[in-house]
Amino acid sequence: MNVKDQFDLTGRVAVITGGAGLLGVKHAEAIAEMGGLPILADIDAKRAAGAAANVAKRYGVEAVGVKIDITKPASVKKLRDTLLRQHGRIDILINNAARNPKVEGGSLAWSRLENYPLPQWELDLAVGLTGALLCSQVFGAEMARAKRGVILNIASDLGVIAPDQRIYRKHGLRDDQQPAKPVSYSVVKHGLIGLTKYLATYWAEQGVRANSISPGGIFNEQDQEFVRKLTALIPLRRMARLDEYKAAIVFLVSDASQYMTGANLVMDGGRSTW
């Protein structure tokens, strides 16, 4: 295969969890641009359908928005059965769904480790980690049966390094009132990298590859003080642009990365290098 053909995704069915979210839509656009069929699977059916319609119109390919609760095995299996009935195959799974409470605002004492609510922890892990496990079990097992497929876990630079809590601090707040990046976010993202390695070795002989990507922070109109503090930690001196990961997604789910499995691609502007 020539290089161009290795990136071609024509006819491939790609399930994207959290498909209606900020990055989920961009993953869908990347799949669609290379000829694949993105399935935008999200807890919010209306948003998923709207996002899929926009992707289909923009790229001239089929795109589908569906409701899924990735914390419920029955919901995941239902989508698998629907896709197999309608398309006869599942080629790609992008475990993108996650909870990411914003802590760039004012007092968020609840976010501190000492105060972190157990229900919040359990919900974050249920969506970000257990959901990825369930989707990998259900869709990955089908890929293994078909002797082909790719699983891509969306981790984070905070799955490689610890959060620098200094960038979230706000002037005028007592130490015990300062916001902190929640512990669950780091645990989920570190866990996804571990899950990636497990899956890569477990199903290697069945032709299923598994990799992860660790994006850095994406600029999305955050507070200027927060952006200033964060960019000071990044060698490239800026946050990522929203479209900046799309080519890497295509690389990781296509035949262009066919000899790559169990790896974590870090795209953080160099932050973890320091």
Image (tube, rainbow, N blue to C red):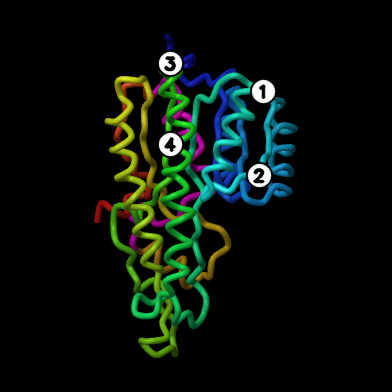
Q: Which residue is mark 3?
A: 3
Q: What separation in Å lies between label 1 and label 4 (alpha carbons)? A: 20 Å
Check disc 4 and give the amino acid type: Gln
The kind of secondary structure element at disc 3 is helix
Res 109 → quadrant: bottom left
Residue span colored magenta? 233-256
Q: Considering only vertical position in the picture, is 50 above or below 6?
A: below
Q: What separation in Å lies between label 3 and label 4 (alpha carbons)? A: 31 Å
Residue 190 falls within the magenta-colored stretch: no
In this rendering, the count of numbered labels is 4
Badge 3 vs badge 4, beta-carbon distance below 8 Å: no
Which numbered disc flags the more N-terminal residue, 3 or 1? 3
Badge 1 vs badge 2, beta-carbon distance below 8 Å: no
Q: Which residue is mark 4?
A: 137
Check disc 1 and give the amino acid type: Gln
Q: Which residue is mark 1?
A: 86
The image position of residue 39, as x and y in percent, is: 62, 34
Res 50 → quadrant: top right
Crowdedness of circle 2 by 10 Å Cα count: few (<14), some, many (20+)?
A: many
Which numbered disc flags the more N-terminal residue, 2 or 4? 2
Crowdedness of circle 3 by 10 Å Cα count: few (<14), some, many (20+)?
A: few
Res 6 → quadrant: top left
Check disc 3 and give the amino acid type: Val
Q: Which residue is mark 2?
A: 67
Q: What separation in Å lies between label 2 and label 4 (alpha carbons)? A: 19 Å
